[in-house]
Image: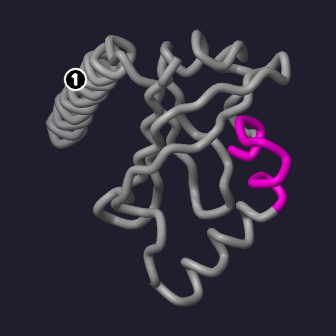
Amino acid sequence: RELFNKETELIKKHTEAKTILNDLVKNQSVVMGILDASFHSLFVIDDHCIIHMVNKKSCEDFGWTKEEFLGRNISMIMTPDVAANHDQFMKNYLSTGIKKMIGTQRQVTARRKDGSTFPCTLGLSETPNGEFYCGFIRDLT
């Protein structure tokens, strides 16, 4: 009888875990759908400047696939002069806590896969837990 109760409890916990996982997958799908519906490019990077997430518009505007973006340094979409200093900008922020770009918008020049450039507005924000940084790019052409 005790073994039967433990099996029943285990099946119940497994079913609950599956339900939670299914809900998470559904929610993630909804959130990605919303991000992919955006009119602007979105890049999510970590404190090492590595890309963890892009939306559909990022791929359309820059010419890389999602797979080509993920795991690479965000400097891939910057002009060489900016790219050369970007990682140091992030290191400076992490060591001082002084926000120079985060929480602001400014006009910059971005670089596509084919090497062509275009003017855009870049807005930067930090996730509440400080784990990730979001860049929102609006093509001005």
Q: Main secondary structure of the magenta part?
A: helix
User: Could you tell me which quadrant the N terminus lies in?
Assistant: top left
Residue 7 picture quarter: top left
Residue placed most toward the observer, 68 or 78? 78
Is residue 94 visible in the rendered structure shown here?
A: yes
Q: Which residues are magenta?
A: 73-84
Q: Answer whether residue 7 is visible to the viewer in this image.
A: no
Asked if 68 appears above or below 134 in the picture, the reply is: above
- The spot of residue 33 in percent (x, y) is 32, 13
Q: Residues within 10 Å of mark 1 (few under 14, many from 20)?
A: few
Of the pair 8 and 13, the residue shown nearer to us: 13
Residue at 19% across, 30% down: 16
Question: Residue sitting at 45 percent across and 50 percent down?
Answer: 106
Q: Is residue 11 magenta?
A: no
Q: Residue furthest bottom?
A: 96
Task: Tell me which residue sits at (70%, 28%) in the image.
Answer: 69
The percent position of residue 15, horizontal first and vertical second, equals: 22, 24
Residue 13 position, x and y percent, is: 22, 35
Rendered location of residue 110, percent (x, y): 66, 34
- As displayed, is residue 2 above or below residue 4? below
Report the side of 39 relative to 120 (left or right): left
Considering depth in this image, is 90 or 129 the residue closer to the camera? 90
User: Residue 109 lies in what quarter of the image?
Assistant: top right
Q: Which residue is mark 1?
A: 23
Mark 1 residue type: Asp
**Is 89 left, or right, of 116 in this rendering?**
left
Viewer-side residue, 136 vs 79: 79
Quarter of the image where one finds residue 30: top left
**Kind of element beneath mark 1:** helix
Question: Which residue is pictured at 77% across the width and 38% down the height?
Answer: 76
The colour mode here is one colour
Would residue 24 appear left or right of 133 to someone viewing this image?
left
